Amino acid sequence: MWTPAKPGALANLLRNSYPEFETVTEQGFQIAIGSDGMVAPAPMVPQFRLRFSNPESVFLLQIAQSTFSVHTVGRYPGWPAFKAELLRAWEAATEVLAPNLITRIGLRYINRVPRLSQGEPPRAWLKSSRNIPEALLDSLPGYVFRMEVATAEAERSVTTVTTDQRPSEKFGALMLDIDRVSQRLIQAGDAQLPDILERLHEDVWQVFDQAKNENLEAYLKGENRDTAA
């Protein structure tokens, strides 16, 4: 059960690895339509997340009443390092959170590649695969591709390809977003958790490996952007 004392307890427990701590509040808003057809605003109860970070680390930890997530900020350190930190932080946090069940495990990979020209098609970085259709590769700007499939009972895979624009970028970036989710219920301390993470990671890697072309592989290795394109 979540109590007012838990944020402080978590901050104290994690202070060596994540010395910076802040509370992020999210205010939702919805429109309710009554039986008489009248529309009325229905403010939602504010939701908050605890955010833990370390300026000397690429990892960012976020905890809310029913969610726990580990993110990377900056360059991805690789799967072995990410998995090790996720499991270490989870084990530490459970001392305070004391959860009974894990109802959802998700692993999401988002790759953002700056585009060199306004008309640059997805083919500049991707190739067709089981998850990437040939028709997408030569699309003009403005494309949004999203495919969600149920890979097994209580399991799903979501692949999204689109563009994103930041004020500092002239042509924006291509976004390859791969999300793999398992909604099988397991005990919080289940010894299968590392194996489940490995399986999700393998699925994500297969989608990525089949979709990337030589240009994207070279770019991710740090080769010159102009040469890779």
Image: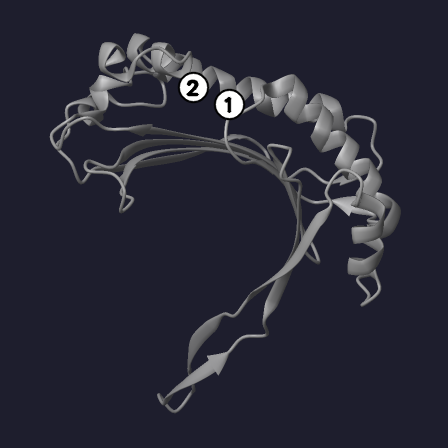
The image quarter containing residue 22 is bottom right
The image quarter containing residue 92 is top right
Residue 105 appears in the rendering? no
Tell me which colouring the rendered structure shows. one colour
Q: Which residue is mark 1?
A: 204
Numbered disc 1: secondary structure? helix
Quadrant showing the N terminus: bottom right
Please state which amino acid type lies under the numbered disc 2: Phe
Residue 31 x %, y %: 41, 77
Q: Which residue is mark 2?
A: 208
Front-most of residues 5 and 145: 5
Is the Cβ of the residue at disc 2 closer than 8 Å to that at disc 1?
A: yes
Instruction: Please report the residue visible at 74 percent of the width from the left and 24 percent of the height from the top.
Output: 194
Please state if 181 lies on the left or on the right of 175 as rendered. Answer: right
Please state if 63 lies on the left or on the right of 36 as rendered. Answer: right
Front-most of residues 6 and 56: 56
